[in-house]
Image (spheres, grey):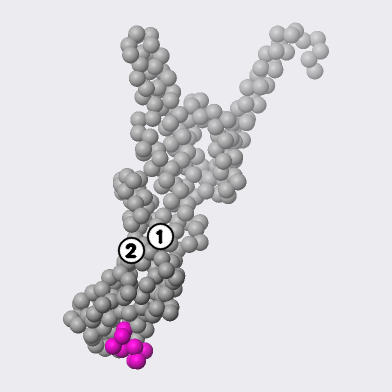
Amino acid sequence: HGLGRPSAEIELISTRSRLLNKMLYKIAVCALIAATHGAPTLDAAATVSDGHWGSDELLEAVEHDAPHGRELFPMLIRAHKVRASRDRARSASHTADVARAGEPMMSIGDKNPAKTLEMLQLNDELNTVVKSDSMCSRRHAMARAAGLAAGLAMAQVNKPGFAAATKMVKLGADNGQLVFVPDEIEICKGDSVTWTNNKAGPHNVVFDEEAIPEGVTQESISMDGLLNDEGATFTKKFDVAGSYAYYCEPHRGAGMNGALTVA
């Protein structure tokens, strides 16, 4: 169709065609993101329009998410990409101004990289809460996510005992029946169990040496004496996964037995 047209006019048409294709490409990528994750945030939309976030970065974000299935919290990371891109633009502008003025240069890129890392971890923890098949993984991730959302530092929420919990077991039912309440419990590694003398004491907690994980000794986890007073407690932390069976020594003959699973 270009026969008989001046070369300058052909070049102008070609340039316009390339610009149109680039615009359509950006619109298509934005539509793909909207279909996969919901509508982009205002910050994301503004970034596309003002040029801070180019089509290559948008495509990279889509390709990054696609192999892993739908991410439930992708915009946490994407918002930080937007802010980081704007910070880099401001930093470049500031550096140029300082160089022209002949002043010593100082970078003002990412003002708080620790916050960026915290947001990345928060995103990971929230996705673990939704996707993990492990009760302990979900519970630990939820505890760390809640800590980060409350403003705690990564170093604090990543401590081994941060997400640890304590389960409570009554020694003797409220009606005086000789049982553990509950008589079966499940905890995670690093959690503790507190047994409280409730009714029909005295009671104690003795683990069956034939029904505990290998490497754990009966003496290290069982009580030495008896709980005589109502409200008296015995607490033990468990760091080895496996199944544990225990009983109340004075009332074993009455069937006062318990079971503990450490995941």
Between circles 1 and 2, the one closer to the viewer is 2
Q: Is residue 161 above or below residue 7?
A: below
Which residue occupies 24% across, 88% down?
Answer: 200
**Looking at the picture, how far across and down is residue 137, in whole percent?**
44, 58
- Amino acid type at mark 1: Arg
**Left or right of residue 51, residue 146 in this image:** left
**Looking at the picture, how far across and down is residue 131, in whole percent?**
50, 56
Q: Is residue 93 above or below residue 176?
A: above
Which residue occupies 36% across, 38% down?
Answer: 114
Q: Nearer the viewer, residue 17 or 201?
A: 201
Q: Which mark is residue 165?
A: 2
Q: Are marks 1 and 2 in contact (CB under 8 Å)?
A: yes
Few, some or many residues within 10 Å of mark 1 (<14, 14–19, 20+): some
Q: Identify residue for label 1.
A: 139
**Left or right of residue 244, residue 224 in this image:** left
In the rendered image, which quarter contains the N terminus? top right
Q: Can residue 72 be seen at all in this image of the molecule?
A: yes
Which SS class for mark 1?
helix
Which of the 4 quarters of the picture holds residue 65? top right
**Looking at the picture, how far across and down is residue 35, in whole percent?**
57, 44
In the rendered image, which quarter contains the C terminus? bottom left
Q: CA distance from mark 1 to mark 2?
A: 10 Å
Which SS class for mark 2?
loop
- Is 73 part of what is drawn in magenta? no
Range of magenta residues: 248-255
**Left or right of residue 202, residue 161 in this image:** right
Which residue occupies 23% across, 86% down?
Answer: 201
- Is 253 part of what is drawn in magenta? yes
